[in-house]
Image: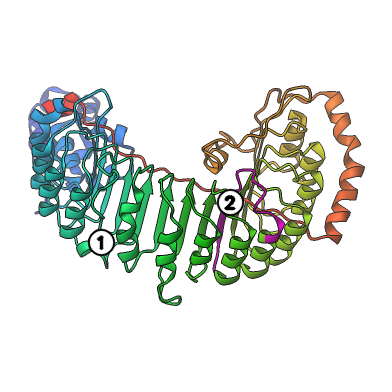
Amino acid sequence: MGQSPSAAFHREASLTLLSSSVFLSGEEFLGEIVANRDYTAEIPDECLAYIFQFIGPGDRNRCSLVCKRWFRVDGWSRHRLSLNAQSEIVSSLPSILTRFNSVTRLALRCSRKSISITDDNLLTVSTYCKNLTRLKLRGCREITDEGMSAFAQNSKNLRKLSCGSCMFGAKALNAVLDHCNNLEELSVKRLRGIHDGAEPIRPGAAASSLKTIGLKELVNGQSFAPLVVGSKNLKALRIIHCLGDWDSVLQLIGNRNRNSNPLMEIHLERLQVSDIGLFAIANCAKIENLHIVKTPECSNYGLVCVAENCKLLRKLHIDGWRTNRIGDEGLIAVAKHCPNLQELVLIGVNATHLSLSAIACNCSKLERLALCGSSTIGDTEIACIAAKCMALKKLCIKGCPISDIAIEALGSGCPNLIKIKVRKCRGVSSDAGEWLREQRGLILVNVDAFDIDCGFEASVSDGGAHEIGVELPQAVGQVTGTDASTSSNGRAALNQTSEKVGGLLNLAAGTDIVHSFAIFFISETEDPGISTQQQQL
């Protein structure tokens, strides 16, 4: 009862082995059993499928080639699938989708130099994948508005759609929004069919279900204004590098009832938005996550208004693009009105001890701090961070004029610190990183040392904060740099700084100077394409 066919086959093979045992000695007989026994045959299919969930996509593909049973179990138990959506896959597409008939998340990618699948193939996907809830399209240039409309009619359970570098336009998106009334997330990037004069994109049947909208690198992003404004339960809005004036759109969002506005996250990057837009954001009292990145028209006035009204703010990322329009005044307001702040990222913002001391005193929950490209963050500021930021867990410093004195200050401060990353700080030597590793062996230390005579440019890349948080040390206490060895001269230089550090720490104790930055970036990996061997099986 409840035994798989493979288990029955195992019993039959065992009987055959027993019938031939009369010709074997006792030890030879036991060895023969052990050598030929398939222990996995006794594992139910459901348990085998559960085990498959804990291995990576590449290993899972290889496991499916072990035997026909594993091949079959992998097929019906896999819920995520990524396919190379070139035209060559068309003949194999029905058999692939028949095998993986339980897929709920599907990614279709095609390179720029290849011809992608067409409307008919996308319709085939909707026919076979009845449980599909998430679809990602990348570079599928042969899919048109008509193909997306037909797909939407067959995929009413779709909850997330992400499309980039495709040729369809507003008509296709309106069809999805009209037919997929459970759609919760829409992400659009470089959609070629969205151009000047395109019809407006409306929320349609998804007006109540849509919770996240992401727009990136669109020529006519303004056509999404009715969608953004009309999504009643929108919680996250991300607009990156889209042309047009976005102040008016933000004003329409802010005009909603202040207390009932559900918006909790706003990401504005490389946009034409000013303090007028920030004043509108201030009407969204539930904002917890705010990114103001490379928006040169935003200033302290807008940030002060946001801080005074959005008191639930937990994450704040600011890239001032070295315009010096956001500084102490705005950060002091954040420190005064946002006591729940846990993550602060400042790039190209020249803050001084005035704002840092206020943040140190009032933001006691600050756990993650990143400082990039600031000419005013020096040894004194870092010493104050070490003395006052008791909850700080992750600290990243890039392109700031600090020296070994700052590193030695961190040797005894910030008791909860678990990771330190220092890059492009010309005054920091590799000896300082090695010393810090010895002082606090449980901390992940990543120090990129610069020679004193090398040229220096405190540049902030387009990746900005993303570059700060991506590279993780390979081992606990690892120190990376041009030279990780400890020389006697370097050690002597560090010892000479001890008295100076003591003075700075005393100063920090008297003046509440604190800086906190932090960044977490999570990338979701998709399953690799199915191999030719798997298709043949």
State how far apart marks 1 and 2 are (Cα).
Answer: 30 Å
60 and 403: which one is in front? 403
Mark 2 — residue? 318
* Element carrying mark 2: strand
Q: Residue at x 33, y 46 (%)?
A: 220
Quarter where residue 312 is shown:
bottom right
| Location of residue 4 in the rendering, given as x and y in whole percent from the top left corner | 11, 45
Q: How crowded is the residue under tag 1: few (<14 C-alpha within 10 Å), some, or many (20+)?
A: many
Most extreme residue toward the front is 197
Q: Main secondary structure of the magenta part?
A: loop
Seen from the viewer's position, the closer of residues 323 and 6 is 323
| Residue 387 in sight in this render | no
- The answer to whether any part of residue 381 appears in the image is yes
Residue located 16% across and 54% down the image: 175
The answer to whether 183 appears left or right of 284 in the picture is left
Residue 252: x and y in percent read 40, 66
Q: Decide whether residue 328 is among the magenta residues.
A: yes
Amino acid type assigned to the residue bearing label 1 in the image? Pro
Nearest the viewer among 263 and 197 is 197
Above or below, comparing residue 184 to residue 436 in the picture: below
Query: Which secondary structure, mark 1?
Result: loop
Closer to us: mark 1 or mark 2?
Answer: 1
How far from the left and from the top, in percent, is residue 269? 48, 48
Q: Which residue is mark 1?
A: 203
Query: What residue span does the magenta drawing correspond to?
Result: 312-329
Whole-percent x, y for residue 171 in the image: 18, 50
